[in-house]
Amino acid sequence: MTENMTNYQRTEYPRPQYQREDWINLNGIWEFAFDDKNIGQTQGWFYQPSFDQKIQVPFTYETKASGIGDEIFHPHIWYKRTFEIPRRSRNKKVILRFQAADYLTQVWINGSYIGEHRGGNAAFSFEITNAVDVDKQNEIVIKIEDSNSCYQPRGKQRWREENYGCWYVQNTGIWQTIWLEFLPAEFIDSVKIDPDVDTNSVSFEYSLAGDVDKNWRLDTIITFDGSSVKKTSIYPDRNLLKLNIDLLAEIHEWKLKLWSPKHPNLYDVTFQLYVNDRLKDEVKSYFGMRKISIKNGQVLLNNSPIYQKLLLDQGYWQDTMLTPPSDEAILSDIDKTLAMGFNGVRKHQKIEDDRFMYWCDKKGLLVWSEMAATYEFSDEAIENFTKEWLDIMRQRYNHPSLITWVPFNESWGVPRILTDNKQQAFTEAIYHLSKAIDSQRPIIVNDGWEHTVSDIISLHDYEEFADAFIARYQDKDRILNNLHPHNKSKYAFAQGYEYKGQPVILTEYGGIAFNDNRGWGYGNQVNSEDEFIRRYREITNAIKEIPYICGYCYTQITDVQQEVNGLLYENREPKVSMEKLKEVNDA
């Protein structure tokens, strides 16, 4: 066992917004093997006595924290470990849950094939009840296949042997928490939570598992800071049902607590399912009362305009890459983001760990959630993208900090969207499918340029000189009527689409790097902190001077491998004074 394997361990419950008590964390040391000739399945490796290496889960073999640290691409890998069913859980369903694994996951329990899942970003699970033996140790074997295909959503993972541009070392295998959860025959499968600030109410859409009958009762218990708000009991007559609750209560003078960055108030809620007056299932969750809307070219939070000061965040760490090394590391990034005067992050090309979302909910950090891109357009890419995107939307829906969905970025995966009707139609379809799931949050179709249908027009421009920026953007019609490219080469809209009064936000700019020959940034590199702060101040103030631009997103929070344009180094040490950055953002 290497030092890195003992330094990094993920022991927290992975879904704090949907938490049960009866679970076993399967992170930790597993047996591991590369299968470069892809012979494992035909040779029955799911019966293999042992594998030749050890790996620390949930860190991929490419990372130092895994204990392996091999950055060469291996498309076929295997995991194995044993587990026991606790005595308290022996009469329950056994669910094997993955928060994320990349890309095609197959599972065997005690030699019996369970199933497979395709996708690298969404959570998934298997019921393994009939395959386990409650009286002895059980063996779980997992095979994961990955590829260099540009038809699968891969985000910033390279598909060549070496890093290049802004694409980094690939991410193969289990990269978020894996665990067992134990459920009764009747349980609460999911709850979709919809706050309604305008009516002071919240609605719950429940999905129940089991054979519903007249002896069922579902309790919803809402509290705030330990004080009772509402308790409601319903007697379900079907597996899918909805409930709306008026939240006004004597918890303070206004009888309602709203969620915002300055006041990230959260209501706690417990869901309890009773059968014949016996408690069968209990889930603890929370929600925030907040509203995102658009009016007169502005984004509104709780019916008031909000100027968004976002930080591009790719969520990479030195020793763990895409997997956050710990809760403390997540909190440190959030605290530094807030300390530098930003009120949100654009999570770029990554579906972040659910505990990151939890801490953003708690701390009041706004989040734009952006899908990992494909890079070629085909029927296969459409299918891979669409299924996983819809799964992600459902899984992240309840987080109050999440205020914007971004399915596409910079025409990646739709490279001819400017003129190609099929690629345009695909983005329109994703927009409308997304709206069918979530009618509340804005959806940005093709962040950066060449928009089709989009609730916000987001532009990318790494112009470093304030005067040139102001000259380019002072004529709103020239930019938004496609009379001139907004960043010297790209137009705001795809052909056949036009501006309809949406808010405009500059969602990538800056990218300033120091002149140290370690990698690259945008524009000329700087030689001192004073030069850095001066350029940051001038270009940020230039953005603020354009009246129709209602927010910005600076690139980026940290260096990432060969890209050294972060405000922090990869080890999270600040490059420049965070207080001086905050002064600029607060001005």
Image (cartoon, grey):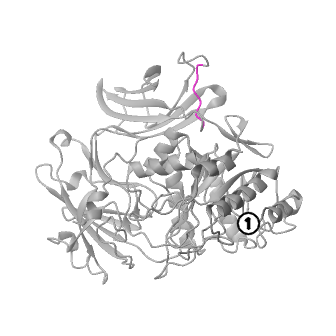
The percent coordinates of residue 204 (x first, y second) are: 51, 34
Write down the residue under mark 1: 464
The percent coordinates of residue 49 (x first, y second) are: 14, 71
Report which quarter residue 555 is drawn in.
bottom right
Q: Residue at x 52, y 69 (%)?
A: 156
Question: Magenta region's main secondary structure?
Answer: loop
Give yes or no for residue 256 being in the magenta stretch: yes
Placement of 401 over or under 45, stated as above or below: above
Specify the segment rendered in magenta.
255-260
Question: From where the camera sits, is residue 572 visible?
Answer: yes
Report which quarter residue 445 is drawn in.
bottom right
Mark 1 Cα shell of 10 Å, populated few (<14), some (14-19), many (≥20):
many
As helix, strand or loop, the secondary structure at mark 1 comes to loop
Q: Quadrant of the C terminus?
A: top right
The percent coordinates of residue 2 (x first, y second) are: 24, 66
**Amino acid, disc 1:** Glu
Viewer-nearest residue: 311 or 571: 571
Give yes or no for residue 456 being in the magenta stretch: no
